[in-house]
Amino acid sequence: MTRTLSRDRVKTLLAGFTGKRVLVLGDVMLDEFIWGNVRRISPEAPVPVVEVRGESYILGGAGNVAANIQALDGIPILIGIVGKDAASDRVRNLVREIGIEGSTLLPDDRPTTVKTRIVAHNQQIVRADRESRMSLSAECNEALAAAFTKWLPTVSAVVVSDYDKGVANRELLAQILPEARQAGIPVYLDPKVQHADYYRPITLIKPNQQEAELLTGMTIENEKQLEEAGRRLLEKFECPYALISRGEAGMSLFDRKRSHHFPTVAREVFDVTGAGDTLIATLAIATAGGASIEEATILANHAAGLAVGKVGTATVRQSELLADFDSRDADPAN
C-alpha cells in the first residue's frame, strides 16, 4: 500500500493535473453567504440578531466540483440545469468568471437551487434552501444526454454529483453510464441513498459513513464492520472501488483485494461545506493525470483537509496541496 508520497512524486502528480479534462454532471447550485456579527439576542424570540456586513456568491454542488477542478489547473466540463431567474444569471456569471469554458447549463422552468447560509464570527447560524426536486422532462433529459455524449470523447474522467435535485435520475444515468463504460472513461459518483438503484456501471462510489451505513443496511462501529461495509458496497454497485469518507476518522478505500485506511490530515475544521466536492474533484483529476487510486486518495485526503480549514464553500489549488505536503514532510500520517 502507498503510505507516503515523496515531494518529487507529489510534484509529478500535480503536474499531471494540468490540462486534464473532467466532465462533471449533476445538480448545479448557487451558494449564497450572508456574513455578519452577532452582538445581541432578538427581543422577539430567543434567536441571535445578525448585523449583516456583506454577501458573497459561490458555485455549489456540481458547480463546486467543477470549480475545484478548475482551481487544480484542470479543465472541467460542467453539465446541469438552472432556472430562468436571477440566481441562474449569477450562476452563469460565476461560471464565466472562473473560466469554465465547456459548460452546458440548460434552462428549466424550475427555480435555480439556492442555499443561503448566514454566517457570524465564522460560524454558520442557519441555512435556508430554495429548490425543486420535480422530475426532469424527457426533453431536458435528452438535452443533458446529448451534451454528455458530445463532450465524453474529450475527457479523461467523469464525476456524477448527485444532490437529489433531479439531474442524476434513473432515465438519464441508464443512458449515459453505459456510454462512459463503453468509452473506457472512469466514473466517480457522489451518491444519494435513495438513488442507489441508478448507479451502474460506475468505477468508484464515494459515500460518507452515514450514507455507507444506509446503503449497506448495517452499522459501522468498529474495523470489522467497516471492512464488511466496504465489501458490501463493492458487491452492491459492482464497481472496482468504494471510498468511505469518515470525518475525523479519515477515509477508507476498498477494492476487490484489500482495504486502505487514511487518517485525517485536517489541522483545523472551520466548515465542512463542500469538502466532499473537493475530495471527489481531486480524486478524479489525480487519476486522470496518472496517479494510482491510492495516490489519488492521499492527494484527495489532503485537499479535503485543506477545504475544511476554510470558511464556506472552498476550492484548493495545486500550490496549497504542495505546501501542505511540504509542511508534513510528505507524510499523510502526520
Image (cartoon, grey):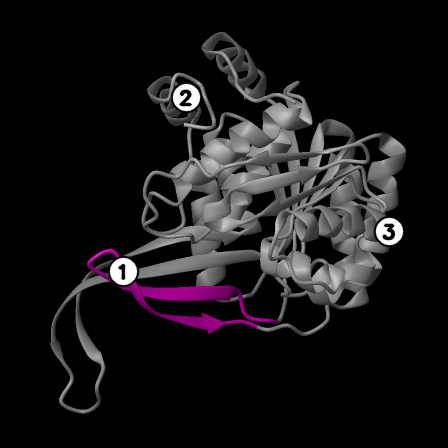
Relative to 289, is 129 above or below? Answer: below
Neighbours of disc 3 within 10 Å: few (<14), some (14-19), many (20+): some
Residue at 42 percent across and 52 percent down: it is 272
Residue type (three-letter) at the residue carrying disc 3: Gln
Helix, strand or loop at mark 1: strand
Does residue 315 belong to the magenta stretch? no
Point out residue 5 in the picture as x, y percentages from the top left corner.
52, 16
- Comparing 73 with 324, the one in front is 324
| Left or right, 126 with reference to 85 | left
- Comparing 189 with 70, the one in front is 189
Residue at 50 percent across and 16 percent down: it is 10
Helix, strand or loop at mark 3: helix
Q: Which residue is mark 2?
A: 325
Q: Residue furthest left?
A: 39
- Quarter placement of the C terminus: top left
Q: Which residue is mark 1?
A: 123
Q: Residue furthest top?
A: 8
Point out residue 312 in the picture as x, y percentages from the top left corner.
35, 52
Residue type (three-letter) at the residue carrying disc 2: Phe
Q: Which residue is mark 3?
A: 175
Point out residue 321 in the picture as x, y percentages from the top left corner.
42, 25
| Left or right, 67 with reference to 27 | left
Q: Which label's residue is closer to the chain start, 1 or 2? A: 1
- Comparing 207 with 89, the one in front is 207
Residue type (three-letter) at the residue carrying disc 1: Gln
| Left or right, 232 with reference to 273 | right
- Quarter placement of the N terminus: top right
Callout 1–callout 3 Cβ contact below 8 Å:
no
Q: Which of the 4 image quarters holds residue 42?
A: bottom left
Q: Residue furthest bottom?
A: 44
